[in-house]
Image (cartoon, helix red, strand yellow):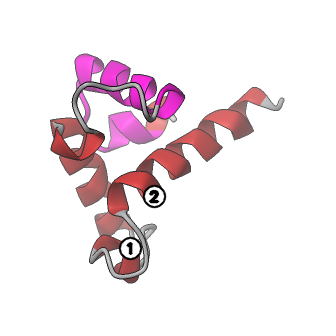
Amino acid sequence: MREICIAAGLLEPEIELTEFHVDNPTDCPLPFYESTAYDKLFNHFCDTGEMPLGVAKARTGEPDIWILDRLASCKSDSAVV
């Protein structure tokens, strides 16, 4: 997960905020989609083609939820060694 955040250009405080959102998706005072971390990750996943177009345009899913789910899956994959 951290590697993706770094590749997207997130700074350390943004990475920490993103990790908090991944671990506590409903306990955040500021919605993830209002953060600079969201903007950078959204652009990263769109530029790499990982995010489906329907999700990116919010037709078939919510981009912020997709990003947090994607990062959570990376985090859980790295925990299973």
Q: CA distance from mark 2 to mark 1?
A: 8 Å
Q: Position of residue 12 (x, y in %)?
A: 28, 18
In terms of secondary structure, what is the magenta stretch mainly? helix
Q: Looking at numbered disc 2 in the image, what kind of residue is underneath it?
A: Trp
Label at residue 25: none
Q: Residue at x 25, y 17 (%)?
A: 13
Q: Looking at numbered disc 1 in the image, what kind of residue is underneath it?
A: Val
Residue numbers of the magenta segment: 4-24
Figure check: 64 above or below 47:
above
The one nearer the camera, 13 or 57, is 57
The quadrant of the picture occupied by the C terminus is top right
Label at residue 55: 1
Q: Secondary structure at mark 2?
A: helix
- How many residues crowd around disc 2 within 10 Å: few (fewer than 14), some, or many (20 or more)? some
The one nearer the camera, 42 or 11, is 42
Left or right, 79 with reference to 5: right
Where residue 38 sits, quadrant-wise, is: top left
**Residue located beneath label 2 in the image:** 66
